Image: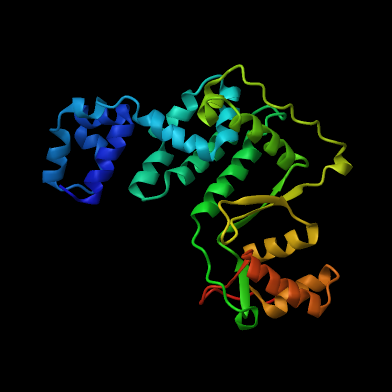
């Protein structure tokens, strides 16, 4: 009875009442594809259905934890949809199911769920899609494994560190996100209070400028070693181009120098930046076996 598939099935039933009902009413169909033995399947389907309804606030507590990681996204989604129903619907979604059966952090699965919701047609003034990307990236770097720090001279190839992300967003989004986050965090009942408060006034998003003046901003999401949490900052265009190149593929030292030269850096300046970014944790030594770019 301790097999992981049994535990995963029970967890899903605890969070998704409709799924639990289907397990009891149509077990063969509902549990098809779930790796349960006959004994385990019998134990699940013959358990008392009332046991799955003893804690009606389980999803609310879990949602409260999620909201702490996606405070602005959840607030915007509640505003856009007019209720918190779509937030609760996460626990009945394929994204939640995959987080249980694949052992994936719930917050990352919720980030994928938000991305799917944000992909639907919405008013251009609604920044949900971009802010969801930002908060998802924060959740990702918070959980990413930290690459070992090696002397720059010993590193022959680099990639973007697991604890860093580079995002291209519309101009002014980082400032707007900071303003919204301050409002949400200052709510008397915290972030979850902001989400359920229909009267909460969020800052108005500044209008976009003319097309020729609306080149994308670049945000660097980073979780520096020793920091209490991830940081967000605007990235200089030349630096962002280099980091994005390191995100796409492994770069040898020669590749790095060549790319930096395209931004006007000398060989010495390129190597100094290489060392600085390795020390800061934005770059990491490339994993063994990963192909190095040919340049």
Q: Position of residue 151 (x, y in %)?
A: 61, 79
**Nearer the observer, 117 or 2:** 2
On screen, residue 181 above or below 25:
below
User: Residue 202 lies in what quarter of the image?
Assistant: top right
Q: How is the image coloured?
A: rainbow
Q: Position of residue 110 (x, y in %)?
A: 48, 40
Residue 137 left/right relative to 265: left
Residue 73 left/right relative to 37: right
Q: Position of residue 5 (x, y in %)?
A: 25, 48
On screen, residue 294 above or below 249:
below
Count how many numbered circles sit on residues in the image: 0
Residue 80 left/right relative to 110: right
Q: Position of residue 83 (x, y in %)?
A: 52, 20
User: Residue 117 lies in what quarter of the image?
Assistant: top right
User: Residue at the spot x=58%, y=28% of the render?
Assistant: 75
User: Residue at the spot x=40%, y=35% of the render?
Assistant: 62
**Nearer the observer, 30 or 76:** 76
Camera sees residue 121: no
Camera sees residue 230: yes
Q: Quadrant of the C terminus?
A: bottom right
User: Residue at the spot x=72%, y=30% of the render?
Assistant: 124
Residue lying furthest top:
199
């Amino acid at each position: 009875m301790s097999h992981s598939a049994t535990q995963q099935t029970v967890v899903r039933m605890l969070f998704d009442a409709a799924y639990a009902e289907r397990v009891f009413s149509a077990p063969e169909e509902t549990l098809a594809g779930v790796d349960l033995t006959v004994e385990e399947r019998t134990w699940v389907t013959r358990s008392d259905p009332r046991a799955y309804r003893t804690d009606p606030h389980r999803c609310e507590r879990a949602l409260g934890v999620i909201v702490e990681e996606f405070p602005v996204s959840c607030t915007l989604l509640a505003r856009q949809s007019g209720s918190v129903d779509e937030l609760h619907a996460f626990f009945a979604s394929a994204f939640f199911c995959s987080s249980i059966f694949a052992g994936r952090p719930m917050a990352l699965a919720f980030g994928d769920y938000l991305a799917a919701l944000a992909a639907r047609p919405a008013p251009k003034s609604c920044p949900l899609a971009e802010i969801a990307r930002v908060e998802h990236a924060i959740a990702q770097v918070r959980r990413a494994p930290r690459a070992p720090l090696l002397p720059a001279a010993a590193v022959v190839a680099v990639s973007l560190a697991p604890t860093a992300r580079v995002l291209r967003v519309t101009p002014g989004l980082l400032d707007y996100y900071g303003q919204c986050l301050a409002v949400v965090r200052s709510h008397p009942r915290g972030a979850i209070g902001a989400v359920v408060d229909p009267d909460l006034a969020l800052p108005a998003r500044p209008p976009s400028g003319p097309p020729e003046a609306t080149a994308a901003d670049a945000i660097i999401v980073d979780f520096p070693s020793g920091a209490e949490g991830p940081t967000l900052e605007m990235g200089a265009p030349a630096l962002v181009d280099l980091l994005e190149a390191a995100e796409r593929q492994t770069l040898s030292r020669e590749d790095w120098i060549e790319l930096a030269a395209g931004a006007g850096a000398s060989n010495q300046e390129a190597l100094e930046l290489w060392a600085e970014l390795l020390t800061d944790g934005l770059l990491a030594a490339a994993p063994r076996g990963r192909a190095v770019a040919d340049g």
